[in-house]
Image (tube, grey):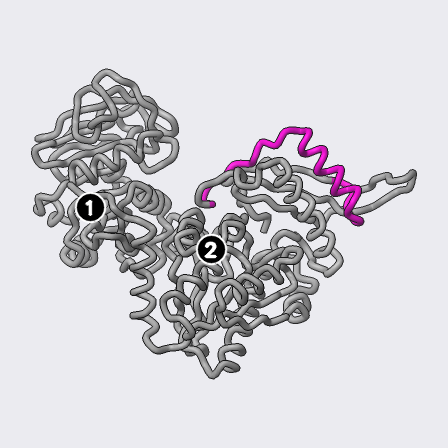
Amino acid sequence: MTFENFQLDPGDDRWEAVPLVRKLARLLRDIGMTTEGHPGLNPDLRYGLSSCRWNANTQAEEAFERLKPKGIILSGSPASVCEEGSPRAPQVLFDSGLPILGICYGQQVMSQQLGGEVRPGHETGEGGEFGRAYLTVAEDCALFDGLWKTGERHQVWMSHGDKVTQFAPGFRIVATSDGAPFAVIADEKRKYYGTQFHPEVAHTPDGGKLLANFVRHVCGLAGDWTMAEFRKTKIEEIRAQVGDGKVICGLSGGVDSAVAAVLIHEAIGDQLTCVFVDHGLMRMNEAEQVVTLFRDHYNIPLVHVNAEEMFLGGLEGETDPEKKRKFIGGAFIDLFEAEAKKIGGADFLAQGTLYPDVIESVSFTGGPSVTIKSHHNVGGLPERMKMKLVEPLRELFKDEVRALGRELGLPEAFVGRHPFPGPGLAIRCPGEITRDKLEILRKADVIYLEEIRNAGLYDTIWQAFAVLLPVQTVGVMGDARTYDFVCALRAVTSTDGMTADYFPFDHEFLGRTANRIINEVKGINRVVYDVTSKPPGTIEWE
C-alpha cells in the first residue's frame, strides 16, 4: 500500500495533512528506509501507510499492484472502527502473504477484519487511553528482537478511545498495558503484528527501533536509504523533468532555496538562472552574503533584483499576517515572471519548498487538519504563467536539507545557519511594517545572535531571532521618559521544525543580552523572552 489516504494519489499533496502518517514517514526515513515519494537506494523499498478513508476497490488496490511492496503498515486514523462506514483495509492485503503491522486504528481494523472484536471504551466501562502509558512485555516476538525482554516495562504513547476486546484467531498477546490488554499482539506464522500504542511519536522512546525490527527483521529490507543516493536520484529526476528547458530559481537568502539551487545546477548546469529578490526584508548584510556565495563560490548565473520599494510599498499599512504572506508570495511570482521574460523565457520555476511548508499550508474539507499558516512557496503557480514547478526538496525536513547541503559541499557557515523564512522580517514585525521598525529589528537581531555565538550556543539552538512587537511601553533613560518598542527574543530547539521547545537560557545570558539591546538600539526600551513551545505556538510569530 501507499500514502494514498483520502482516495488520493501520492502526488496530491493533501495526503500530507495526516499528522500520524507524516510522523511515520519521517521515522521510516530516519532508520534508512525509503517511502513512496522519497527516493532511496533500492526502488523496492517502498512502504505503505494507509489511513483514514481507504477505497478498497480502487486506489489502494491499484497502488498495491503498482508498487509491489515488501511489507504493509496500517497506520493510525481519527476514525472509529465501530462507526458505520469507517475505513477498512482491502482484502487483497491479507491475501498477499506479506508482513503487516497495524498501529492503533491499524491494529483495531486488522483485528476486526480477521475475526476479532473492537468496542468503544465507554461501552466497556474502561474508557480510552491517552498520553504516556507503560506496558509489560508478556512474551517474546520479532518486534522485540534485541530490544525488549519478557517481564520488562516500557513507556509508550497511547491515543485511543476504542479498544480490542478479543483478538483474532492465530494471534497471541505479547504485551499489555493498564488500559489496553492487547497492547501488542502477534501472529508470527503469518507475520502479522499489531500495536495499540504509537511507535512513530517521540514519546515512545523505542518506537523507531520497533519499526526497524519490523521492516528489517520481519520484512527483510536493508535500510540503505542515504542522502547520497537521494542526491543521485533527484539529479536524475530533475534532468528527466527539465530536459532542454530553462529554469529560474527563486532565492530567498535561506538555506532551503540555496540547497535547491546548487542541486539543480549540478543537474542541468547553465540551464539554470538564479533570481535573488532583495525585498528589503532581509537581515543585516544578508543580501551581500547571498550574492557573494552564488557568484563567487558557485559561478551560478545570478540576477539580483532590488525590489525593496515594491515590497515595502505593497505592505504599507497592512497588519494581517495572512495578507502579508499572500502579498509577498504574489509579488515574488510577479517578479519571477518578469525576470523570466528578460532572459528569453523560462520553462520552469524552482523553489526550495519543504515538507513542513506543505503540511502547515494544506487544509481540505473533511480532513483532520487545518491551515496553520500559508507559506508563500506552497500552492502552485497562477494559470497565466506557462512555467512548471521544480521542487526537489519538497519531501525533506529542514535537518535533511542541511544534510543534503553538506553532501553538495556547501560551506558549513551557510548550511548551519538558522532558518530564515521567505517573507523575511515581515513576519518578525507583527503589525504595520515601516523602514524605521525594520532597521530597529535588524540591529536588535544582530546583537542577539552575536551574544548566542559568544556563548557557544549557536549550533545547539535550532532557530533564534528577535521580534519587534507592535507595543510601546514607558521607560526611563537618563532621567528622561521614553515611550519605545518592546523586543521579544525567540530561541527554540527542534529537529525538523514540526515540533519545538524554547531554549532554556540562564538569566545571566538574558539579562546581558537585554541590556545590550536596550543600550545599543535606539527605539527599544524593554526586552522579553518567549517561552512558548510548538505546539501550541508556532516558531515564527506570524
Q: Look at mark 2 in the image and give the residue it sits on.
A: 410
Residue closer to the observer: 531 or 160: 531
* Amino acid type, label 2: Leu
Q: Residue furthest bottom?
A: 344
* Label 2 Cα neighbours within 10 Å, binned few <14 / some 14-19 / many ≥20: many
The magenta-colored residue range is: 497-526
Residue closer to the observer: 518 or 274: 274
* Label 1 Cα neighbours within 10 Å, binned few <14 / some 14-19 / many ≥20: some
Q: Look at mark 1 in the image and give the residue it sits on.
A: 88
> To which quarter of the image does residue 150 belong?
top left
> To which quarter of the image does residue 526 belong?
top right
Element at badge 2? loop
Residue closer to the observer: 536 or 266: 266
Q: How many marks?
A: 2
Eye-nearest disc, 1 or 2: 2
* Amino acid type, label 1: Arg
Where does residue 528 sit, x and y in percent of width and height?
69, 38
Q: Which residue is at a point 52% across and 64% down the rendered structure image?
A: 294
Horizontally, residue 192 falls left or right of residue 254, namely left
